[in-house]
Structure formats: C-alpha cells, structure tokens
Amino acid sequence: MKAGLCVLVLVLIGGIAGSVWYAGREKERSLQQATALESQVQAVQAELEESRVRERQIASLPPVVVVKTNQSIIVPAKAAPASAMLKDPETRALMRKQQDQSLAKHADRLISEEFARTWNLTPEQTAKAKEFFRERAGAAKDMLNAMMFDGLDDDALAQRGRETKQRVESAEAGLRAALGNDGFDALSEVERAKEDRDRMRRVRGELASSAEPLSKEQEESLFAAFVAERQAFSFRANFSDFSKMDFEHVRDHFSESTIQTHFEDMQQLNERVAERAALFLSPAQIEQLKTTENNHLERSRLTAKMTTELFNKRREN
C-alpha cells in the first residue's frame, strides 16, 4: 500500500501487538517472549475466525428492508464489537500512547534537521510543522481505531468521518502555513518517496548476496526509476493522500473492490519500473527485481485482508 496508509496501519498493528504483549507479560512474567508471541498470533487467528463465523451468521439472516421514496434500502448489521482485551481502558490507553510515540518518530524522520535547513525553518516553525503533521496523521489514526474497535453503525461512523475530515483539513492548513506552499509540496514528496526508498532497500538487500549485486550507478538509476514511474503513474485508488480520503464513507474507501484496484495499480507500476530498469540492469537482476516486488505485493495483500477483517467491514451486496 501507499506510504500514508502503510504507516497508519503499521502504527495501529504495532500498538495492538505492544499492548497485548505488555498485558501478557504483567500477568505471566515467567513466560518467554516466543511463547507470548505465539499466543498473540493464535488470538488474532481466533478472532479472525470468529469474525468469519459472525459474517456467515449475519448472511444467513433475512435482510431488513426499509421502504422510502420508492426505494428499498438494505440496512446492514452493526459492526461486531472488538475483543474484551482491546476494550479494556488501560490497554487502549497504552495502545494510544504507543501509536502517538510512533507518529512522533515518523514526524521527526520526515521533518528532519536537514529538511528544516533546506527550507530555512526556524525552530518554532519546525515545531509547529511537526505538531500539525502529528495532528493530521492522528486524526486518521483515531478514525481507523474507531473502525477497528468501537463497533460503530454506519450513521455514527459517517459522523465520525465528517469530524475527522474537519480535523485533517484544519491540520493540513496549519501545516501549509508553517511550511509555505513550496515547503508543503516538498514534504508531501518526501512522504511519497518513502515507499521508493523502501523498495530500493528491499531490492538492494536481495541482490547484495547474489552473483550480481547492484553497482552504485545501478542503485542511483533504479531509485530514479522508482521515483519517476511513481510520479508519472495515475493511481485509481489513492491511499496516501489524506486530502482525497473519503472519511465520511470510509468503509467504501476500504472496500474489497477499491483495494483490488489498488493492487492492480501497483502491479502495473511494478511492470513499468521493470521495463525502465531493463535499460541498465542485467536479465538476472531484472528477474530478482520482479521476484522481490511480487513477493512484497503478496505480503501486502495479506496485510490488507487482515486489516479489513479488523475493520469489521460489512459484507458487500
């Protein structure tokens, strides 16, 4: 997935894992870390299976039909609540603390000292920019938390979405004021380029132990290819731009069809990068590039599937 969504999802999953691990350690200090991690995996698998069972049960019930202005409206069932552990106030507080710490670190990495020097930011401007950056990401994070854990019906979720949109727009306006239009655009590009840097690290690592590791010139050319093709690509499903996120209809934004479109886009983008890279990489290196990116795409598909299950997404008709 794109950078903005990936970061938020990883922050959420990291917060969940950290909170569950902490609670388990407090209750049973004698357990080794491997045992604790195995228990967490089993718990997640059990909850996903419970979610599937609930979906099958709901699907077997007759739909509730409301007749209004000659239209039949199917009223979806309320999203299933989260587990008791994730509703525990102490666990939720710890999870929010860990999420906030992760977002703060992310802001520090992007609005770095080098970035501040490049755009001649004063310490006050830098602090303000980080504050608005955290608020913008925090608004989306809170929305995803609500989807995962609060069991909101569609009306309540839509209202939360409208409030989230207002928070995002306000924070984005403050961020633009702190950085100026050019600085804001530069930061947006730094955010989007994170995925390019991650892709570069993956491919470099895979080829490092092969018979044909990347030369410095090849690394520079490949990274330029990642950036250029991503900038030229017209994504049909954009998960990285908060301003284009439809928070009011967020379940539709994360629907199976939208996510499928996103992965089709990413597959096409990978193919274009490979075509460009064929100009400066060997056939063996091209094959490794394709294998690495395809493997990552499959792992991302699994993450998306698990995430939408955690979102308690309603069944599509």
Image (spheres, rainbow, N blue to C red):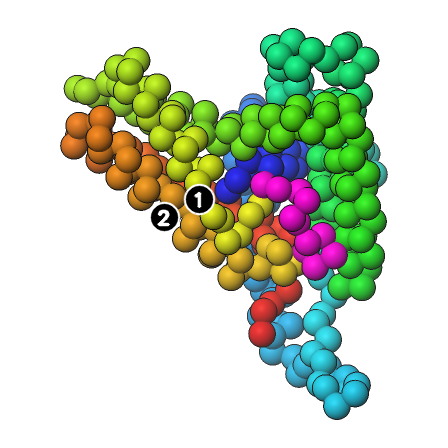
Q: Residue at x 45, y 25 (%)?
A: 197
Question: Would residue 103 be found to the left or right of residue 295 on screen?
Answer: right
Quarter of the rendering containing residue 97 = top right
Q: What is the three-letter code of the residue carrying label 1? A: Phe
Check disc 1 and report its element: helix, strand or loop. loop
**Where's residue 182, x and y in %?**
65, 26
Pick the front one: 15 or 143? 143
Q: Which mark identifies residue 268?
A: 2
Pick the front one: 169 or 11? 169
Question: Would residue 15 be found to the left or right of residue 1 on screen?
Answer: right
Q: What is the three-letter code of the residue carrying label 2? A: Gln
Assign the C terminus to one quadrant of the image. bottom right
The verdict on residue 184 being magenta is no
Sequence-earlier tag: 1 or 2: 1
For the record, the magenta segment spans: 240-250
Instruction: Quickly name the residue at label 1.
Output: 233
**Where's residue 82, x and y in %?**
71, 51
Q: Residue at x 72, y 42 (%)?
A: 140
Residue 313 visible in the snapshot = no
